[in-house]
Image (cartoon, rainbow, N blue to C red):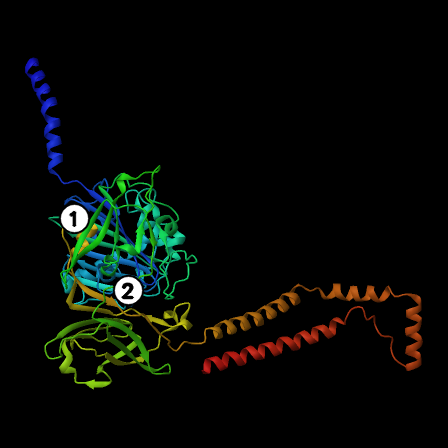
Amino acid sequence: MARVGFVVLLLSSIFLPKIFAFGLEMIPDEEFTEELLLKPLPDRKVLAHFHFQSRAPPSSSNGRHHRLFPKAIAQLINNFQIQELELSFTQGRWNYEKWGGSDFISTTNAKPPGVELWANFDVSTDQIDPTWRNLTHALSGLFCSSINFLASTTAFAAPKWSFRGNSINSRYAALPREAVCTENLTPWLKLLPCRDKAGLARLLDRPSIYNGYYHSQRLHLLSSKSKGIVLEQTLTVVIQPELKRAPALSDKTPRQPNWSVSSVFKRPIKGKCSLSKSSKVFFEVEEGLATETDGFDLSVSPDRIIRKVDALTGQRYSGFLEYDVSRFNVNSPLDLGLTWKSPLRWSTPQAPFHASRFLTGNGNERGSIAISLRPARKSDKSEDFCRTHVVIFQIVPWYVRVYYHTLKIVVNGKTQILSDLLAKIQVSPSEDKTAPGVLEIMLTVPCTDQSIVLFMEFDKGFLHIDEYPPDANQGFDIPAAVISFPDFHTNVSIIDGSAEKSSLLSKIQERNIVQSYTEILLVPLTTPDFSMPYNVITFTCTVLALYFGSLLNVLRQRVAEEDRLYASAAGKQGLIPRLMSKISSKFYKKKPEPSQGLPSPKGSRVLFNVFVVALLAVLVHYYYSESSN
C-alpha cells in the first residue's frame, strides 16, 4: 500500500500542475491598454485625448480579487446591477465650430460643463429609483464630488430616445455648477494600474491640464454576463502651446505654433506602464492636412502610417501616425514635436446644425427659453427630397415652470405649424419640489440653409429660504440641452485592419449618433433679503447684552461699601479746599458740595432704574408688535 501511495503522489505532482496551468490558459485574463491621440486644431491649439481601457472576464463571485481591474468599480457593478454607466467631469465648453462637431471626439467625449451622469440598470422597475440614489452616494464618495445631490427626484429624469439602452431602466442627471479640480482627478487616476507614476498617465501635469481651454475626464462602464466588464477612462484636453514670435509673412497669415510633448505637458514620454498590454501614441492628420504633407515636420518618424477612408467621399488619406511607446525608455524618451514650415488653413468636420440656447424676456417673473439651430454648411439638395431628424432633450428644474403648450417653432423668421415639423414629442411637466420638467422632441427639418428657433414660455417659482444655495444672487443654472441627429453617424473606416489591435481605433470606427450640447442657462430668481435676519439678530443680541450687563452690575454692587468710599474720598480733602467750600457756602448761603471725584450713588441708582424701565417698555412693545404681525 505504501508503494501504491507513493506512485499516486508522484503522478499527481507531475500532471496536476500541467492541468492547472492548462485551465488557467483557458480562462481569459484581465487586460489593460493605454493610448494617446494628439491632434492640431485650426485655431492654433492642440487636442490631447488619453484613452485607458481595462477588461475583466465574466465572474459570478462578488468582489473577488482583481489583478488589474479596479475592485471598487467591480463592486459598484455587482451591488447596483449596472449594465452601462457614463460619468463625466468637465471644465470649459467644447467649441463645436472650431474643434469639430461630427467626429469621434466631439460626439462621445465632448461633454457639458460640470458633472453629467447616465446609467442603465438591470433591476425591476420599482427598484430603479432606490438603486439610483444609492449609486449617486457611492460615486460621490468614490470621486470626492457632490454627485449625491443627484439623488433627489427633482434632479434626474428618464430619457426615451436620446440615449442608448432601455428607457424604462435609464436615468440621466447633471450638475452644471459642479467645480472640477484635482480632488476629482486623483481618485480617477487611482483606478489605473500604474496610476500616474508610469506610462502615458505620467504626462498628466496638473497645471498644464487645468490651465487649458477645455478638459473633460470621463468614465464609461459596460457590463454583460457573456463578455465581462469593460472600463473605459478618457481624458480630453485642449491646450494652447507656448506662442513664440514667428517671422512675418507676406500674406499676413498667422502661422501655427510649434510644439512638442515636453512643451505641452512639461515632460516627455519615458516608457509605458509595465502592466499594460499595449501603449501607443497616435498623431491624427485631418483630411485638410493630409494633402499638405510638406507644410509641417515631425521630430520623430512614425512606426506605421494608418490610412483611413472618408465615409462620404470615399477618398483615402493618411489618417493616423502610430508610435509604439514600448520602444522608448528613460534613457531615450519619446518627445514627439511638430514644426510648421508654412501657414496652413483647414476645417474640421461639422454637425448638420450648430445648436445654441438663450433666454428672452425681462423681469424676475416671466420669460422664454429659445433653442436655435443654425445650418453648419450649405446644402445643394432641394427641400422636397431632403429631410433630416433632430432630437432635443432638455431638463428644466421645477422652479422654472415651463408652459409646454406655448411651444412655437420659427423658421427663417416665420412661425410654422407644429404638425409640419413635429415627428414625435414626449413631455413630462414639472411638479413643485417633486420632479423636474422634461421635454424630448423629434423634429423633421428640411436640408436647406434655414435657421430654426424653438420658443417656450415659463414662469419663475418661489423657493423656501432653506432651499437657496449660498450664492443665490448669482442665479440658478439650467442643465445643457442634448441635441442629437439620428440620421448622421461618426463613421471612419481604417483600411489595413489596425483597429483590431487598438482599442482607441476600434472606438473611432464605431457608428455613433452625432450629438452636441447647448450652453448652460443662468436664470435669476427673486431672492429674499438675506441680510435682514442678520441685522435683527445683531440688534437683539446687542440689547440683551446691555440689559444683562447692567443687571449683573447692579446685583454685584455693595451699597454700604460705596457710601464708605464716598465718605473716605470726601474726608481726604485738604485743609484749604474745606475752608474754601465753607466760605463759599456762607457767602452764597449754600451747603458745602461733596467731592466731584465720584458721582452720587443715589443719582446713579435713579438713572439706572429709569433705563431699565425704558428698556422693558421697548421689549414689551416689540413683543406685542411681532405677535400681532
For label 1, the crowd category at 10 Å Cα-Cα, with few meaning under 14, some 14 to 19 and many 20 or more, is: few
User: On the image, which quarter does residue 398 sit in?
Assistant: bottom left
For label 2, the crowd category at 10 Å Cα-Cα, with few meaning under 14, some 14 to 19 and many 20 or more, is: many
Residue under numbered circle 1:
498
Up/down of 16 relative to 46, above or below: above
On screen, residue 458 versus residue 596, left or right, reads: left
Describe the element under mark 1 as helix, strand or loop: helix
Percent x, y for residue 173?
A: 26, 64
Percent x, y for residue 587?
A: 93, 80
Count of numbered labels shown in the rendering: 2
Give the residue type that dot 2 points to.
Ala
User: On the image, which quarter does residue 23 sit in?
Assistant: top left
On screen, residue 173 versus residue 12, left or right, reads: right
Percent x, y for residue 38?
A: 29, 53
On screen, residue 381 versus residue 522, left or right, reads: left
Describe the element under mark 2 as helix, strand or loop: strand
* Residue 626 seen in render: yes
User: On the image, which quarter does residue 423 sit in?
Assistant: bottom left
Residue under numbered circle 2:
174
Q: If the image is split into quadrants, where does the N terminus sit?
A: top left
Q: Nearer the viewer, residue 466 or 390?
A: 390
Q: Which mark is residue 165?
A: none
Percent x, y for residue 22?
A: 10, 32
Up/down of 586 relative to 295, above or below: below
Q: State the residue lying farthest toward the front.
A: 250
Give the residue type that dot 1 points to.
Ser
